[in-house]
Amino acid sequence: MWLIASVGSYFINGGVYIADKFLLSKKIHSSITYAFYVGIWSIFNFVILPFDFWLPNLRELSLDLLAGVLFLVTLVFWYKALHQSEATRVVPIVGALVPIFSFLFSFIFLGEELTERQLLAFLVLINGGILISIKHTRFYQLKEVHDRLRNKFGDLVGSVHAAYRPTQRLIINSVVSALFFAGYYILIKYIYTAQPFIGGFVWSRLGTFLAVLFMLFIPSWRRLIFEKQRGQKSLKNLAFFIFVRLLAAGAFIMINWAISLGNVALINALQGVQYIFLFFMVLFLSAKYPKILEEEVGGGVLLQKIIGTCLITIGLYMLVV
């Protein structure tokens, strides 16, 4: 069941990430503001608590609130990265790092280990995700690769050229968000081992809501959240935003349920499936709405993505059979 829930969640999230990128680029233009409006909806998760009512003790509540706060911090860095580049670039960068960090954290803190077959499936899924995510591969042009890396990142003790600082910020925000995503997944997995799923999930959402309220105490963030949104045509945007958030909430519940049942590292490695969904969604939407979305697809790129898709299919087969 955790496999079905994971794949279903990643399918929904593929569409959610495209919508988030559109809203960040065209409507809201602030990761702080977007994280606030996403996080404020966390309080509505309490509507599901009566289905399995449960009250945590002080220690359990502290862990739940910490998980919620950690998730909001993750959202801020995630939306910063998503705002800086296209979804088909950011999602794979973060998605490739999250399972690696999760594997290390789950081994260190949870004592989770993969069987030989699961480890092989993990590696196959990671490689498939990498092939789907990168735009092109030119292994034979090593000097060009070296020059590009040097231009973007500078020497070890040198400065980064101003033209490439946005790329540096994108990578930093992507790596930090991946690190926090993995930390959140490991902490919430630990919570689910000691608390009922609905109770642990709902009380952790309270942590996100309280952290969102704390954002209002920072004057510069408060101005970003409220003042810069005045005068915008918000009714249509609000309806679209609510629709996207309902989809995201469903996907979030599904992935949390999958984590409560399965191995965190394997579930995160399945994000390669999300790249497939994301790629074809963007391909369709960029053809239909070229002014909103654009995706580079050439013969070599398409071949890479087909090979990556085959690897992900093999990895899924190894997990199921």
Image (cartoon, grey):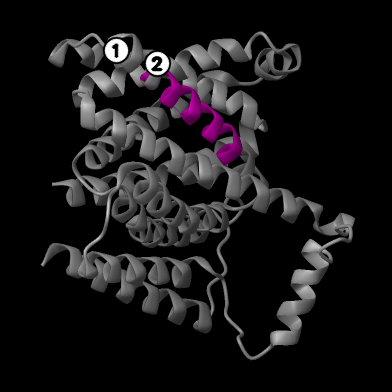
User: Which mark is in front, 2 or 1?
Assistant: 2
| Residue farthest toward the left in the current orientation of the protein | 321
Which quarter shows the C terminus? bottom left
- Count neighbours of disc 2 (C-alpha within 10 A) and say few if under 14, some if 14 to 19, many if 20 or more: some
Name the residue rendered at 52%, 21% in the picture.
37
Q: Judging from the image, what secondary structure is the residue with disc 2 in? A: helix
Q: Judging from the image, what secondary structure is the residue with disc 1 in? A: helix
Residue 46 shows which numbered tag? Answer: 1
Horizontal and vertical percent position of residue 198? 21, 22
Report the Cα–Cα distance between label 2 and label 1. Answer: 17 Å
Residue 217 shows which numbered tag? Answer: none
Horizontal and vertical percent position of residue 127? 41, 71
The quadrant in which residue 187 appears is top left
Name the residue rendered at 63%, 10% in the picture.
216
- In the picture, measured across the screen, residue 258 lies left or right of residue 16, that is left
Q: Is residue 288 magenta?
A: no
Using the image as rendered, state which of residue 108 and residue 49 is in the foreground.
108
Mark 2 touches mark 1? (CB < 8 Å): no
Visible in this render: residue 239?
Answer: no
The tally of labels here is: 2
Span of residues in magenta: 64-79
User: Would you place residue 150 above or below residue 41 in this image?
Assistant: below
Name the residue rendered at 72%, 19% in the picture.
228
Using the image as rendered, state which of residue 258 and residue 18 is in the foreground.
258
User: What's the residue type where badge 2 is placed?
Assistant: Ser
Query: Dot 2 corresponds to which residue?
Result: 62
User: What's the residue type where badge 1 is placed?
Assistant: Phe
Q: Is residue 76 magenta?
A: yes
- In the picture, measured across the screen, residue 84 lies left or right of residue 188, that is right
| Residue farthest toward the bottom in the current orientation of the protein | 140
Horizontal and vertical percent position of residue 42? 40, 19
